[in-house]
Image: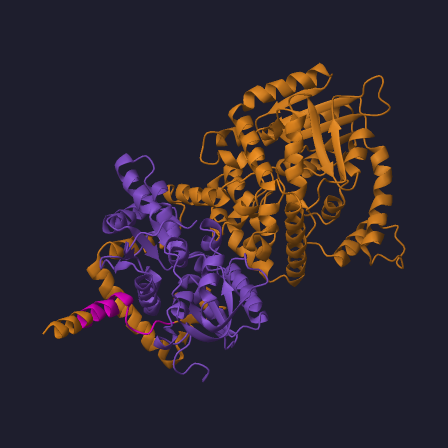
Chain colours: A purple, B orange
Amino acid sequence: MTQKIQSSPHVGLFVTCLVDFYRPSVGFAALDLLERAGCRVSVPDEQTCCGQPAWNSGDRATTRRMAERLIAQYEGFDYIVLPSASCAGMVKDYPDVFAGDDAWLARARAVSDKTWELTSFLTDVMAFEGIEAAYEGVAAYHDSCTGLRKFKIREQPRALLSKVAGLEVRNLSEPEECCGFGGTFCVKFGDISSRMVGDKADDIMGTGADTLLAGEVGCLLNMAGRLKRVGSPIKVRHVAEVLAGMTADAPPIGDGPDSGKEG
Amino acid sequence: MEQSTSHTFKENAHRAIDDDNLRVSLQTMKTGFRAKRSAAVAKLPEFEALRDEGKRLKDHVLANLDFYLEAFEAKVLEQGGHVHWCSTAEDARQAVLAICRDHGARTVTKGKSMIAEELGLNAFLEREGVTPIETDLGEYIIQLRNEPPSHIVAPALHVRKEAVADAFRATHTHLAPDRDLTEPRQLLDEARSELRDKFLAADIGITGANALIAETGSTIIVTNEGNGDLTQLLPKVHVVIASLEKVVPTLEDATTILRLLARSATGQEFSSYTTFSTGPRRPEDTDGPEEFHVILLDNGRTKMLGSEFEEMLRCIRCGACMNHCPVYGAVGGHAYGWVYPGPMGSVLTPALIGIENSAPLPNASTLCGRCESVCPMKIPLPRMLRDWREREFAAKLTPDRQRWGLQAWAFAATRPALYRLGTRLAARLMALAGGRRGRLSKLPMAAAWTQSRDMPTPRGDTFMELYRRHKVAMGQAANGKKG
């Protein structure tokens, strides 16, 4: 997978709408990691959403409007990097969105071809070895479905985390099982999603880890929500926060300064 | 056609999730099937190449379906068999009934067949005064319980062994009250002794087919109990019911399918019995039926050819997709409301009974992709689930609330200034509500989430806002240095 390293490539960072809204620390961590890996990073200020909610709802016209904007904003970069395999997967699918429209299809393909998920980009493209973070703890790692199956991302985040001083990483007993987030699925099919995330939380707690890491804010919100509901002290974070050594910048997902002090 | 409750999938699922017995059954199914498949695949280095071969083979058949079906028919006729082309389920039911009437049949034995489920054949035959008897143990159990299969390979996987004993006691009224039926072996012996007489008494035997071979005019069934052989060899008439995409060109091709099928379904290298049927009994044969019929069912499949759902017709009914599906694993097969459950069912059911009658099915998926990753025929199930959603959206079957929600979202997301204002306000409000705990236990409009989870809250500033400030600060720092 490793590609020839281009010196100082110009990367357009798409932070994703969930990071923008829920977890700005992931955006800053991604920015920091990319810069330390030798990239010139830009953060286009017109970015909003990749269109995935519309695409997965079968609304091609709306997806197209979102995709046209993203393509126009990002086609000038050497690479487009997202701290989410799910959203990166949407951009990868842009050629399907524009099937039959040759002019846009060519632009969609060009953008799709240079789009990467963050941990995979750092490892497979930049061969980044400069992790300098420390984190005392035992982390269970959740592989996101799109990362695992669409991008074959399994070893990349673990390789990066292996450089973090003080950290031990453990695997789940059912590492290929979906956490039950699924975008709008979690609210459309609340009962089923609840069962899935309940099973996932049991698996996470069964590892004996004190921290849960993943590369996908959607999954993390879901799993953190369940872990906190059942009173688990497990700290939930995006992998980029740990890799960038920025865990002091924000409390874990679903925790606040007073978490643990219920009432 | 079988009655469908696919349109009430959500309610069906809600009931299924509350069923603790079902939960235990599904847990056992998941660990068993998944581990066995994974071990079988690991033992066959060429499994990936075999998947590619299977896909290529079926794509070729689908591109030349008429040719191979006609070749198959010619071979069956040549050997003295009969072929009935049936475009609808009703045509197929009538064809089966006509054969029953011709022979004055009062009882028919049946091997396991999902096409029979698609035809609602048992209920139909009963209405017509013909008694169908299921001979596959799982099918026999659910026939006694008067319910449909919940899995295409393991039809009674939702029934725990205590419930099997209850069903036997309720129907095998000769059973002594103190007869021990606690162990699976005892249940099997009881079913076997009950079925033995039925095999001998049956006028007609009906089986499905795992493949139809154009080269030889043969049909194949794979079983683990041997019941299929007794079903098709003992009665005077053997009726095979099969959907038309089951045809393959040659014997060699059939073995490709069978090698994939057993490993993907049960983790076996080969099932215990693989039975080939080629025409009626010949003078030199020691046994076999006097008449051999093949019912070829379309029932909507040819309409899938050339559509975005054509690849679904590669399916060989192994059940791997449902065995690995987290949604099937949570709700079981009955919740899907028609014959075929799990991911393959959520793609196939709308094609066969209409998307308007099964609208929730393609939506009941996180599109996690595990089904496609284990499918022996590499069917792009998630892509087709999404394609059904697109058809639903175009036909305005998508719920209004979701359509309006999307439009409102898109309106904002294509206007960055408005979007920034909205997200900043919403993030602050949520941060305020989450307070120093960093999460909410209840959130209006999000009950589906908060029924089982807290909602983590943002800290108050969006990334784009913080980044704008960060850039200003960096700019000032840089200017400061210069000055």
Q: Say if residue B93 shows up in the picture.
A: no
Q: Residue A186 appears in which quarter of the rendering?
A: bottom left
In the image: residue B221, left or right of residue A175: right
Q: What span is colored magenta in the figure?
A: B457-473
Q: Is residue B236 magenta?
A: no
Q: Residue B428 appears in which quarter of the rendering?
A: bottom left
Residue at the limit of the structure toward the top, as seen here? B78
Residue drawn at x 39%, y 74% as measured from the top left: A247
Nearer to the camera, A24 or B147 = A24
Instruction: Tell me the quadrant of the picture where the C terminus of chain B can be found.
Output: bottom left
Residue B212, image x, y percentages: 65, 27
Residue A236, image x, y percentages: 45, 71
Residue A224, image x, y percentages: 46, 70
Magenta segment's dominant SS is helix
Numbered-mark total: 0
Up-down: is B460 above or below A191? Answer: below
Residue drawn at x 49%, y 33% as measured from the top left: B310
Up-down: is B297 above or below B180? Answer: above
Residue drawn at x 65%, y 39% as measured from the top left: B261
Nearer to the camera, A242 or B241 = A242
Up-down: is B208 above or below B167? Answer: above
Q: Is residue B460 magenta?
A: yes
Residue B139, image x, y percentages: 72, 44
In the image: residue B376, left or right of residue A263: right
In the image: residue A161, left or right of residue B29: left
Q: Say if residue B35 shows up in the picture.
A: yes
Instruction: Tell me the quadrant of the picture where the N terminus of chain B can be found.
Output: top right
Q: Residue B249 appears in which quarter of the rendering?
A: top right
Nearer to the camera, A83 or B442 = A83
In the image: residue B225, left or right of residue B319: right
